Image (tube, grey):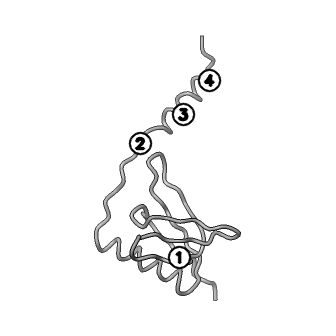
Amino acid sequence: MMLPEHKDRINLHNEQKIKQTKPELTEEEQQELYGRLRSSMLHTLRASIIVFKEYGNRQINGVVDWINPRTHLIKVDIGADWELIDFKDVLKVELDTPGY
């Protein structure tokens, strides 16, 4: 016999294991994302970057430190640390505009 709490926990765990497929972005959408990442780098603006992961997307907040056009890697300064992101996994970029 299984307790209802255990059953709910198992169902939640199984739902989280469902793989998602990566949406295909058009060339125009990719150029827009690249432009926003570049703006973050050039103007040291904080960006909220949504990165595709098979079992649930991830959000990274920080300032783009550099973009390597050859390897398509993006280094994001997230405060006391940094993170490397592959451009092909970027789904969305929103810039934090400074208040005036």
- The label number, if any, that marks residue 52 in the structure image: none
- The label number, if any, that marks residue 13 in the structure image: 3
Q: Secondary structure at mark 2?
A: loop
Amino acid marked by disc 4: His
- The label number, if any, that marks residue 19 in the structure image: 2
Q: Secondary structure at mark 3?
A: helix
The Cα atoms of the two marked residues, 3 and 4, are separated by 10 Å
The Cα atoms of the two marked residues, 3 and 2, are separated by 12 Å
Q: Quadrant of the C terminus?
A: bottom right
- Residue 74 image point, x, y percent: 49, 71
How many circles with numbers are drawn on the protein?
4
Depth check, mark 4 against mark 2: the one in front is 2
Amino acid marked by disc 3: His
* Badge 3 or badge 2: first in the primary sequence: 3
Residue at left 53%, top 80%? Answer: 40
Residue at which label 4 appears: 6
Residue at left 63%, top 24%? Answer: 5
Q: Residue furthest top?
A: 1
* Badge 4 or badge 1: first in the primary sequence: 4
Residue at left 45%, top 76%? Answer: 68
* Badge 3 or badge 4: first in the primary sequence: 4
* Relative height, residue 16 to residue 47 (above, below): above
Label 1 environment density (alpha carbons within 10 Å; few <14, some 14–19, many ≥20): some
Q: Secondary structure at mark 4?
A: helix
Amino acid marked by disc 2: Lys
The foreground one among 34 and 9 is 34
Label 2 environment density (alpha carbons within 10 Å; few <14, some 14–19, many ≥20): few
Looking at the image, do the residues carrying marks 4 and 2 touch, with CB atoms under 8 Å apart?
no
Residue at which label 1 appears: 95
Q: Secondary structure at mark 1?
A: strand
